[in-house]
Amino acid sequence: MWHERLRAARRAAGLSLRELAAQVHYSRGYLHDLETGRRKPTPETAARLGVALGADLILSEEDDRLAWTIAHPDHPEPGAADHLSVILGGLRRLEDTTSAAAVLPPVLAHVDLVSSLADQVPDRDRLGVVDQLGQWEQFAGWLHAASGDPQAATEHYGRALNAALEANRPDLAATALSMRGHLAWQARRPGPLLSLTEAALRQAVGPAVRLVAMQQLARGHALAGQVAEADRAMARADHLADHVTEVPPWMYFHDRAYLEMQRGLVLALLGRPEAAAEAIAAGLAALEPERAGAAWTDQYRKLLSADPADSPQTG
């Protein structure tokens, strides 16, 4: 909900209600009422707060529509799944400019909400809500992983996989498997990294999802010291990149810049520091301005200044 996005953005900015009130010239009590959902902002107020906090707080009619669905689950607003998708997209963009920890509380609240809706809406609407539940669970898993809680991330990815299979969304199922493989990458465990990524490739249909999994497979082989296999997987990923015309909403940040940085990780693991540095630098330079300063880019910047003998720990 909008009030949860406001609270997350304020906390990410490190501001108290009183400090924010002084910046935007509203009373502390008014901001408190906005954060608790007791009062609704005007579009102008929402825009002013967004500018002050550097966050996407544009007031959306989707909030009102979702509120109706929550209150009347047996008669949901037409397109309830689309409303959830719009709100999820806003939270994804908010994470890009704040942090995973700041966005996690409202995302978890929505996961509970969407899970409850899936059990209450009429059968004709269930699969659309279950599809959304899978996407919310996948994002919650990512936020837990980025916040250093792999156990919670694994649980959310498991629920995302179940929802994706029920909703018949093979690419979402593949992403859940791939993200569990990413947890193994973070733990430096090539065995489960490779097996989970291969399982993702068996599920994946779209070239974008296959591309991301294939790049991860290359990292897995490189981590295991399998140079020839890593090179083959990178070549296959390059081929897939030429056939990607669109990406699913949960992979919006997997553009050419991000994929080039991922390529740099493989090259670093294969002991090719100059090529790795070139790829990572090119990827960082190509990032859109609003993403260039995101927290997740720090690991790549550190690689550029690291000792060439060091191997990357995350990705």
Image (cartoon, rainbow, N blue to C red):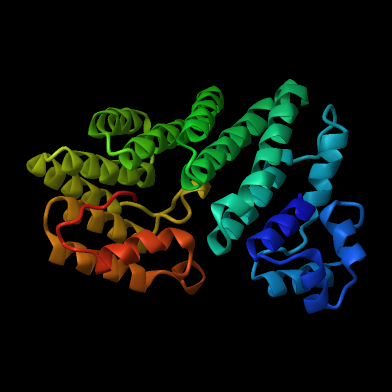
Q: Residue 183: name its quadrant.
A: top left
| Residue at 52 percent of width and 38 percent of height | 141
Q: Number of callouts in the render?
A: 0
Residue 165 percent across, percent down from the top left: 50, 24
Q: Residue 304: name its quadrant.
A: bottom left
Left or right of 283? Residue 96 is right
Q: Nearer the viewer, residue 17 or 114?
A: 17
| Residue at 65 percent of width and 33 percent of height | 128
Left or right of 79? Residue 90 is left
Compared with residue 98, is residue 239 higher up or lower down, i.e. above or below?
above
Q: Residue 213: name its quadrant.
A: top left
Is there any visible trace of residue 150 in the rendered image? yes
Left or right of 31? Residue 82 is left
Left or right of 251? Residue 58 is right
Compared with residue 129, is residue 85 higher up or lower down, i.e. above or below?
below
Residue 143 percent across, percent down from the top left: 53, 45
Residue 235 percent across, percent down from the top left: 16, 49
Is there any visible trace of residue 205 in the rendered image? no
| Residue at 73 percent of width and 34 percent of height | 113
Q: Nearer the viewer, residue 179 or 209?
A: 179
Q: Residue furthest left?
A: 228
Q: Nearer the viewer, residue 186 or 75?
A: 186
Residue 119 percent across, percent down from the top left: 73, 22
| Residue at 31 percent of width and 52 percent of height | 243
